[in-house]
Image (spheres, rainbow, N blue to C red):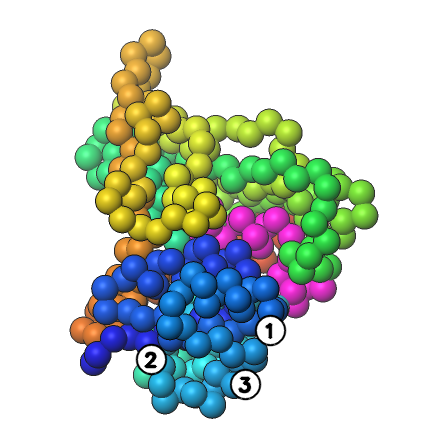
Amino acid sequence: MGDIRVGLIGYGLAGSAFHAPLIATTRGMRLAFVVTSNAERAARARAENPGVEVVDSADRLWGRAGEMNLVVVASPNCTHVPLAWAALRAGLAVVIDKPMAATAAEGRAVADEARERGLLLSVYQNRRWDGDFLTVRKLIAEGALGNVFRFESRFERWRPTPKGDWREDPDPAGAGGTLFDLGPHLVDQALVLFGPVTHVYAEVSAHREGVRVDDDAFVALTHASGVRSHLHVSATAAEHGTRMRVLGTRAAYVKRGLDVQEAALKAGQRPGPGWGEEPEVDWGRLGAGDEWTAVRTERGDYGAFYAGIAAALRDGAPPPVDPMDSIAGLEIIEAARRSSDEGTVIQLR
């Protein structure tokens, strides 16, 4: 196989900041096509990715399927499933941005189709390569925390004025709202760290006037391992809480602030020397009682996702994110909505 030629559908924030720069800087990958019907985004795609060909519809992309190896779906949530189906039918490997689908059933159907066709399918759960998450994994593996019994994790924003975009579409098929926007990240991290979930309790709310999708949610998970995860997502947090607090029988780890990669990508930076390194002033703390020590944050590396995709396509390695993991996350989000509606704990297994 020569260069892995990639078709990227969508050049909004997800496509332009979270996918194109990583594809372009992954050895052996080439961003060959971008799909957008927006003239300004098309011009920007050409300027930021010399040599890329821009087409104005996915249908035009399928007509060029023989010139690609991989399609990345980075368009609005409601289009994830139909575009993934079309790519698979065109004989192409697929990466879907999160959330994979609006329902777990739709996600399973797409995964089944990929398996039957023998094609790679993966989901862009890039927060597995956040520096703080990698640090927690390392501390757990080293036994620095003892036996972890509670994991607290937050993604909070202050957006009192609604944007009025597709993320606020109340149609369930659109997978709008904060729980679908930020929840897949936190749920996926909790599953990777502590395994399957048996019980879900949630409080899902809408606080902003005129908004008909949730903009604030608390989700409590009980893992089969016995660990409890407390997850918070919000677009209405006037003050942001601690990004992570992990409590164990030996010590705790406390971390504030978001991984540095998101801001760097939004600012137009691309991976290179020093990428993903967090300043010492922002490192988390490990300790108990009055004794605390700063812990260097592991280097974040979103590019590892696409390096894993390249290895899967070239060498037959497992995908960097198994789609079944994302389907398990969708089951939890569905249970969270039920829990909030019914005011009760939902048992999964």
The disc labelled 1 sits on which kind of residue?
Ser
* Residue 324 in magenta stretch: no
Which of these two is toward me, 303 or 331? 303
The numbered mark, 3 or 2, whose residue comes first in the sequence reads: 3
* Furthest residue in direction top, as rendered: 290
Q: Whole-percent x and y of residue 179?
A: 59, 50
The disc labelled 3 sits on which kind of residue?
Asp
> Which segment is the magenta one?
171-193
The disc labelled 2 sits on which kind of residue?
Asn
Q: Is residue 256 above or below residue 81?
A: above
Mark 3 crowd level (few <14, some 14–19, many ≥20, 10 Å Cα) = few
Quarter-of-image position of residue 21: bottom left
Which of these two is toward me, 272 or 72? 272
How far is disc 2 from disc 1 in space, using C-alphas? 22 Å
Q: Work out whether residue 41 can be spotted.
A: yes
Residue at the disc numbered 1:
37
How far is disc 3 from disc 1 in space, using C-alphas? 12 Å
The secondary structure type at the circle numbered 2 is: loop
Task: Determine the residue positioned at 66% across, 39% down.
Answer: 159
The numbered mark, 3 or 1, whose residue comes first in the sequence reads: 1
Residue at the disc numbered 2:
69
Residue at the disc numbered 3:
59
The secondary structure type at the circle numbered 3 is: helix
Mark 1 crowd level (few <14, some 14–19, many ≥20, 10 Å Cα) = some
Q: Whole-percent x and y of residue 299?
A: 27, 40
